[in-house]
Image (cartoon, rainbow, N blue to C red):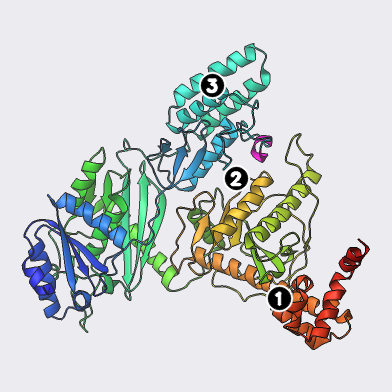
Amino acid sequence: MDLIEKIRLLPTQPGVYLYKNADGEVIYVGKANNLRSRVRSYLLEASQANAKTGSLMREAVDIDYILVANEHEALALENNLIKQRKPRFNILLRDDKTYPYVKLTLADLFPKVFVTRRLRKDGSAYYGPYFPGNLAYRVVELIHRSFLIPSCKVDLSRYHQRACLQYYIHRCLGPCVEELTTPEIYKQAVRDAQLFLEGRQSELERSLTARMTAAAEAEQFEAAARLRDQLSTVHQLQEKQRIATAEQSDDADVFGYHFEDGSLAINLFHVRAGKIVDRREFFWEDLPDLLPTTLAESEKSTTNDLGAPSLMESRVGNNEPKFDGGAVFSALLKQLYIDQHYVPRSILVPVDFDDRESLAALLTERISHRVDIAVPQRGEKRSLIDLAGQNAKQSYIQRFRVLEPSRKAIQESLADALMLPELPRRIECFDISHIQGAETVASMVVWEDGKMNKSAYRKFKVMTVLGVDDFASMREVVARRYRRILENSNSTHSQAPGAPGLDSQTSETNEADEKHGGAPGPSPLGTGVAPSPKPNKEPTTMPSLILIDGGLGQLHAAAEALESLGFTSQPLASIAKKEEVIYLYGNEDEPVVLDRHSPVLHLMQMIRDESHRFAVGYHRKRRAMRDRDSELLNIPGVGRQTRQRLLTHFGSLRDVQQATADSLASVVPPKTAESIWRHFHEEQATATAKD
């Protein structure tokens, strides 16, 4: 049965339809109150030479449909299918991040506190969302400092021999070591954190005050002082904390857009308690190709009853369609809000669309309060939309006209994308380089305050790993690097009793790269290599982010090295070369996939590529040194050509030493092979003869 015949037999009930191409891939998903009428309109518009619908219908060879009971079910099902199948002709929300929540793992014996963007049914308590996003990190930092609840990756289901660094800097009660705390004390700290996160300030103040008074009367002055500090902190941050709740009647999300040359920028303002607290940006390119419209939509008048722009604006001179705002905002709002746990009472959009009232009703059903999606035409609300539109134009200029973003803007975007607790000032990136395990080396490059700091680059010769093992090499290098940080820190501040032991073994150099290809030119982000490095001073604090060139294996190897030194809360990420996906340690199941135009992705790629360049340069230098001074040249009958042939075949001098006489004879003459074998096994042969 061909496509046209299937369309004629479609039912007239509400449902969702899925167009498929010749490979069976879903290329478009839509919903309709009358499936047959809606799908037939595509054929009518394609016959009238509509470029957008024509492109869809030229690829479509089959259609499936799913019947539902009403339009609300159709909206929800359409949204789920679009997110699952990602059809090429649908408008897809590429930036699908959500605002962060604070997660308290109450299902654990010793609960921890984390920042997360995904809510799960795992027995944990979630608080938020937080606006702006960095407020969640400040709240978690407060909980570490005041209530001593950790965020580390240490397994607290069993006891360990010693506590990590967080205990010694007084940001954890130490539940990982027996007798450092008790379940009762830890449970009370968790209870205090819960009261704080739930906004029950008066109850928390009464509890802290009573316990402080009791501790003072019992002459437990240290405990009383700690409770006093907690009470003071709660007072100071009570006014600053803005958590979005359903009780705030003047909460709103405001949208504005700018469309030009087939590309679109949308700004979303989050208004909470009557104030703009944060902004989000969305971008699309070549948008008209993604907007198949129906004939019914194209025949609508140029203005609606409210005087707003129509769903389908008039065509321009060469039959090229203009921006279809209704289709965009219909798709965007569905993907943004249908699956969210919190939706503001008011959503203000600049253009109307067909299913606006149906979507508002569906959101009202799913959320515990009424949700209104409005298209204001005048007054303060329209002014907010106009303001969002002006900012969208600036976002468009910055994104598509390639204006250089400021250093702070890049830092803010990086902190937001990688869930960093603060703006990153220093990033250290590691890479491993070798040829089949020979001359394995590593590099560390440093991005600091908006540019590459060449004076802080480091080279490592891998000392303990034999053969090809990138994971073990990464583990060794990261451990050596940050053991040095601990040593420098302890030379300035006395080491706390019982803190992690230190190993003085290091083998890194602080030579700047001057001979291996030079520094890359200035990047579009303004992060070119510093031309005049200043005298280097080895840092005594950890970097804002450690970046690993590689995938999950290298990431976990680096994490093991850091945890062995007591760094359990250090931000750590890796970037894979082919997929260009960023994995955050602790959130590996939610990799960060950035838009290819993202300044954050460009920065990560630039740092990663510089680390790779530096590692390869050092590896080539090591190989050249090995080739110039080879033990093989001391063997009678072995010249430079024979030496080169052996190293090319076996890969390294070590492998030549371990080769058998027969293996050597397959490369060089038997007499020479015997001389080589005897040279490397002379001592062993002599010892065997004596026995």
Between 663 and 16, the one lying in front of the other is 663
Q: Label 2 is placed on what type of residue?
A: Ser
Is 634 within the magenta? no
The boundaries of the magenta stretch are: 164-168
Label 2 secondary element: loop
Q: Which of marks 3 and 1 is nearer the N terminus?
A: 3
Q: Which of marks 2 and 1 is nearer the N terminus?
A: 2
- Dot 3: within a 10 Å radius of its alpha carbon, few (fewer than 14), some, or many (20 or more) residues? many
Q: Note whether 116 is above or below 467 in the view shown.
A: above
Percent position (x, y) of residue 17?
17, 62
Relative to the observer, which residue lies in front, 218 or 636?
636
Q: Name the residue under label 2.
A: 569
Residue 46 seen in render: yes
The label nearer to you, 3 versus 1, is 1
Answer with left or right where residue 130 lies relative to residue 549.
left
Quadrant location, the C terminus = bottom right
For residue 208, the mark is 3
